[in-house]
Amino acid sequence: MKTLKILSLLCVIFLASSCKQNDWLDWKTQNELWLIENAKRDGYVETLLHRRRYLPDINSRNANVRGYAERNAVNAPIQGTAADIIKIAMVKIADRLKREGLKAEMLLQVHDELNFNVPVNEVDVVRKIVVDEMQNVVQLTVPLIADCGVGKNWLEAH
């Protein structure tokens, strides 16, 4: 029986941004108030892909309970959008690997990282597919960038 040498391919997706920390803090401060006001009015917030997070406690009279909901109102659109993006990318990558008859397997997703077991002879083509799908999964004003590392295991691939 012939053994197939497998490598770990680890790909990460992130926003390409040239904003400085002060720009981010200014944006965050201005938009936190807007997100909280809208959540109080509507009872929910949305990701960029329109998935809703309902916040039933956003208008609570209990300051601790309300504060938790307000933090969720700010966090959910950001974290939820990231989750939406990686989920769609995973589906597209899985479809493409199957369609192209590749033996590579998607093993694990951790936040913005995808880990694959890839036969050595497929590493270049799988890397190209994964980067292409991750970077083009959605069109934003700021480009998505995908970076891949290869190694014998997850640690080496980092």
Image: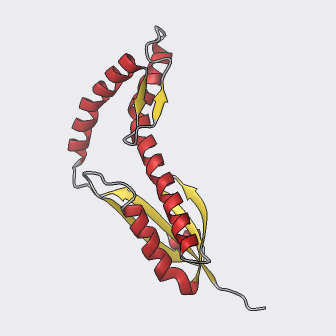
Position of the N terminus, as image quadrant, is bottom right
Horizontally, residue 79 falls left or right of residue 116, namely: left
Q: Is residue 155 above or below residue 24?
A: below
Identify the residue at the far top of this view: 61
Q: Between 48 and 19, which is closer to the camera in this rendering?
A: 48
The quarter of the picture where residue 15 lies is bottom left
Tell me how the rendering is colored: secondary structure
Residue 40: % across, % down? 38, 17
Identify the residue at the far right of this view: 1
The quarter of the picture where residue 58 lies is top left
Residue 63: % across, % down? 45, 13
Horizontally, residue 99 falls left or right of residue 138, namely: right
Q: Is residue 13 above or below residue 42?
A: below
Horizontally, residue 23 falls left or right of residue 49, namely: left
Q: Between 111 and 126, which is closer to the camera in this rendering?
A: 126
The quarter of the picture where residue 119 lies is bottom right
Identify the residue at the far bottom of this view: 2
Q: Is residue 147 visible?
A: no
Q: Is residue 101 visible?
A: yes
Q: Is residue 37 above or below residue 19?
A: above
Q: Between 64 and 57, which is closer to the camera in this rendering?
A: 57
Residue 60: % across, % down? 47, 11
Q: At x 46% / y 8%, what residue is drawn?
A: 61
Residue 22: % across, % down? 21, 42
How many numbered marks appear?
A: 0
